[in-house]
Amino acid sequence: MSYLEHFGLDREPFSNAPDARFYYNSEQHRQAMLRLMHVIDSNKGLAVVIGGVGTGKTTLARRMLDYLDEEHYVASLLVMVHSGVTPEWILTRIALQLGVENPALDRMALLKQLYDCLIEIDASGRKAVVLIDEAQMLQTRELMEEFRGLLNLEIPSKKLLNILFFGLPEVEDCLRLDEPLAQRVAVKYRLHSYTHTTAEAYISHRLQVAGARHAIIDPDTIPVIHNYAGGVPRLINTICDNCLLEAYLLKHNQVTAPIVENVAGDLGLRQQPSQPFKNDMQDLGDIEDIDEMLDSLERKF
């Protein structure tokens, strides 16, 4: 028997593996989606989402990719797994994912192929979007210059390609390697740790999706879990998953405070101070009337 059977769950509620079924549309994720869609639908070119480790950047990027339907968008997601990528690799991968067949080895010829492909996408009434996850790995000026060059692929009054960066705060250092590119950021949005209220709703949401039929985590333990996790979704998942396993091994029907304390100790979190939640205003780039824009875009969600 696993803890799934013990608690009557259909699937693991707190796995950190990407799973669209568990996507939680928190207020800040909803706001980020609205702003990113504004950039794409207005062809503004470049947007940046920044957040600490485990705050949901990759989750948001994958949600964006799923949301961009093939009828209206040609979208691709590139994950930067290390800092050794080259401008040539980036250009070739983007060209392939947007539909260029047999990319040329010569850079200028490849740019021509990509430009022609983007023209075809635009003529079909669709928008080309490239999402770059772990963008803090783009640590050279040459890479930043390559992205600036891609943003120069345009026709009168319209950019042909929109690029969305998702990464740690170090992304801002990367952008500063090429100041003209940094100045082209249309929207920048920061993801923060969850408040207690959001964490409680997040945990409840994941348990409900997993098929929980009763409160298998004592509601009184939620503030303790939130404190040890510092409000970070990934850590909330890790703590809750370990708590369910521990409760199962103890043959308990509910996660209680002593179980949370034991798990926090095992994970080395007891000495970790909680991280205060920030809610400062995000840099909204060149959006002039954000309230009006949000009202119109909200109809999509």
Image: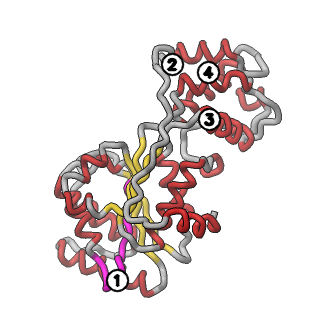
Judged from the image, the secondary structure of the residue bearing numbered disc 4 is helix
Question: Residue 157 got which mark?
Answer: 1
Above or below, comparing residue 72 to residue 232 in the picture? below
Which of the 4 image quadrants contains residue 231?
Answer: top right
Report the magenta residues as a range: 153-165
Q: Pick the quarter of the image with the C terminus.
A: bottom right
Q: Are there few (<14), some (14-19), or many (20+) residues within 10 Å of tag 3? A: many
Question: Residue 199 got which mark?
Answer: 3
- Whether residue 154 is in magenta: the answer is yes
Q: Which is the main secondary structure of the residues drawn in magenta?
A: strand
Q: Pick the quarter of the image with the N terminus.
A: top right
Is residue 78 visible in the rendered structure shown here? no
**Cα–Cα span, label 2 and label 4:** 14 Å
Between residue 73 and residue 293, name the one nearer to us: 293
Farthest residue toward the right? 213
Query: Which is closer to the viewer, label 2 or label 1?
Result: 1
Q: Amino acid at mark 3?
A: Ala
What residue is shown with label 4?
224
Above or below, comparing residue 27 to residue 262 in the picture? below
Give the mark nearest the N terminus, 2 or 1.
1
**Residue at (19%, 57%) from the top-left corner?**
178
